[in-house]
Amino acid sequence: MNGTLTDIKGLAVGHAQNYEALTGCTVILCQANAIAGVDVRGAAPGTRETDLLHPIKMMNQVHAILLSGGSAYGLDAAGGVMRFLEERQVGFDVGVARVPIVPGAVLFDLMIGNPNVRPDAAMGYEACLNASGNEVVQGCVGVGTGATVGKLLGPRYAMKSGLGSASIKIGGGVRVAALVAVNAFGDVIDPDTREILAGVRKPVTGGMADSGKLMIGDLNQIIAGFHTNTTLGVVATDAALTKTEAAKVAQMAHNGFARTIRPVHTQYDGDTIFALSCGDKHSDLNAVGFAASLAVEQAVVNAVKKARPAGGLPAWKA
């Protein structure tokens, strides 16, 4: 066990990034077809194939999940993931071909690096080549390369964030894990101490300004809300879940965002969580969903604590 998403047998995670442009993508390959669900809470999502994951739709299994930077342009990276899988004859058999099922979601990172360079099919393919079942590399990698938080006063007063992952064990030997890319409009809070770990900084002193207090205080002090954000996540378990149950786990996992990001699920975020069931162990659905929220909490904290300064923005470890 390595304490990250790849504790779930059958999953491989790969990153690809451009450190000069400060953007990238992350692919989760499902080496054994996985039952998937999704829950989108943010009001500004950029997604692919999420309708297919609705419980009443016909497709039960997915072959990969893509998380990408580049805003809507980053959805191009899915083409590379599909090519990688097609070359290996992985996909839904439609008779004349195998069509890989690759849901995905994107976050907005164009403000921090080069907005003209975005994840594309070549980068998506590269991420697949880099995928392994080893411990997930965290911080400013993959989809977290250009992630930032605390943008109420605009990008100038934001802080650097990244990608984080965590894994926990519950009763019956069941594992539940999470991987998140934290590019939130709000601040990131320690769920135990309620301390602001990273977020909007005060223009004069550089200390933490507290987005929540600013929003409900004197709005005339707000310089300019930054409208392009989004926190993305994948939770996975080796417990057996139906498609409907996977969707419920994804829904419950958003509670991890609610305890660590303030404010969360705003009009300016496209917060999306995918859930994967990759095993046959028996467990209580409520326990799995609650554990998923706990794993998300730790993954969000890790995303901030493992980030480094970039693009002129400070990080938790300045």
Image (spheres, rainbow, N blue to C red):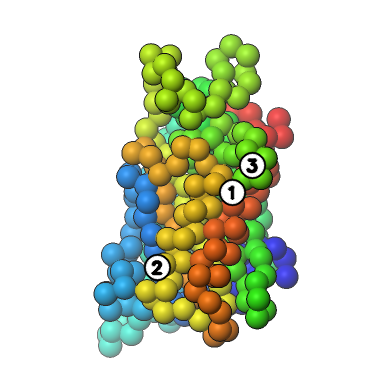
Q: Which mark is residue 190?
A: 3
When the figure is inspected, residue 51 is found, relative to residue 193, above or below; the finding is below
Relative placement, left or right, of 10 versus 92 is right
Q: Which residue is mark 2?
A: 247
Give amino acid for label 2.
Ala
Whole-angstrom CA distance, mark 2 to mark 3, is 26 Å
Relative placement, left or right, of 260 versus 121 is right
Give the number of the mark in front: 1 or 3.
3
| Local SS, label 1 | helix
Q: Nearer the viewer, residue 103 or 115?
A: 103
| Local SS, label 3 | loop
Relative placement, left or right, of 206 versus 33 is right
From this viewpoint, is residue 271 visible? Answer: yes
Q: Residue at x 31, y 69 (%)?
A: 54
Q: Which residue is mark 1?
A: 300
- Going from the N terminus, do you reach mark 2 or mark 1 first? 2
- Going from the N terminus, do you reach mark 2 or mark 3 first? 3
